Amino acid sequence: MKLTEADADLFLDLTWSLQFFVNNELQIIPNVRTREDYTDLPTAEKIKIRAKIYSQPELIDRYISANPDELNNEHLTIVKQWQNFVEGNFYIERFLKGHTIFIGEDKVYGVLGLHEGIDQFYLKSHLPVYVKAVLLPFRGIIVYDGLMQGYNVFFGGGIKRSLKETYMQAKQNDKIITALGERKALQKTTKTKTVQKDWSQEIEQILSISKKLKGGNGQPMINSPVFSLVKASIELANTALTDPSDFSALLKDLKKVERAASKVETTLYRMD
């Protein structure tokens, strides 16, 4: 959930270079004469300069045009892409193997740490946490810019469930954002679709068999409602297979499953 050491060093080097340039241009913090002086500034001072950059993103173009550090084209492109930043307040909802989940304004982002994973700063048992951060693109992924501010607030079960549902919905619909700007657009156009297995033959066979299921004639009372539940479930599976985008049809079949399940439950409660 973090960059390699080399990438983290590069990211911070470019970050401090941009911020040092902006401070020299605007004289936000006086008497900062060298990059080393800037790097040694406390976080609170750097946040002032960071805020100025993202309130005036044209400063990034000014830095690129001046190129005071004689960056190569690749590194200039990295800095240029920072104009696709996302700034705001986020909930850190969970830690995954590949990234940390940030949720902000109903969008879900997969974010990596720099030299340390974000899970090194917050305990899993304390999630969700509420933070102010800037998310930046970096070589096709998303990182935070190293100056994250936390809020000392706690959340009840309602907020936790809502955030979990937001994450689960994004995951189900492949809407977790893992890139920003041009690279994100490129990912959308080049993403290959997974070859789906054709289950139609198996579903047809199960449908055919299910039609033969009948209760009554001295069978246990539970058989009839259970068989109805089986048939309703197979009809739902068939609709999901043949027309997975027809939400109305899927919902209609789901209601049949729920009614059938309710009859099973009622029968079970009536049994001696």
Image (cartoon, rainbow, N blue to C red):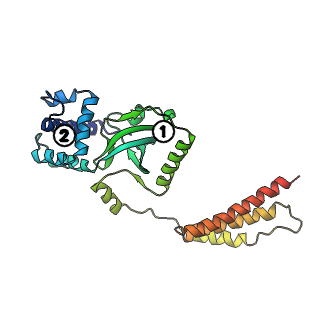
The residue at 47%/32% (across/down) is 123
Please name the amino acid that badge 1 sits on.
Pro
Crowding near pointer 1: few (<14 within 10 Å), some, many (20+)? many
Helix, strand or loop at mark 2: helix
Crowding near pointer 2: few (<14 within 10 Å), some, many (20+)? many
For residue 182, which quarter of the picture? Answer: bottom left
| Label 2 to label 1: alpha-carbon separation | 32 Å
- Residue 202 appears in view: no
- Percent across and percent down for residue 47 are 27, 34
Please name the amino acid that badge 2 sits on.
Leu
- Percent across and percent down for residue 37 are 17, 27
Report the number of numbered marks.
2
- Residue 169 appears in view: yes
Q: Is residue 14 above or below residue 43?
A: below
- Of 145 and 210, which appears nearest the observer? 145
- Of 192 and 52, which appears nearest the observer? 52
Give residue 208's mark: none
Residue hosting label 1: 128
- Percent across and percent down for residue 141 are 33, 48
The residue at 13%/38% (across/down) is 25
In contact (CB < 8 Å): disc 2 and disc 1: no
Residue hosting label 2: 18
- Of 114 and 97, which appears nearest the observer? 114
Mark sitting earlier along the chain (2/1): 2
- Percent across and percent down for residue 178 are 37, 50
For residue 213, which quarter of the picture? Answer: bottom right
Q: Is residue 187 above or below residue 15?
A: below
Q: Is residue 114 above or below residue 257?
A: above
Helix, strand or loop at mark 1: loop
- 252 left or right, relative to 35: right
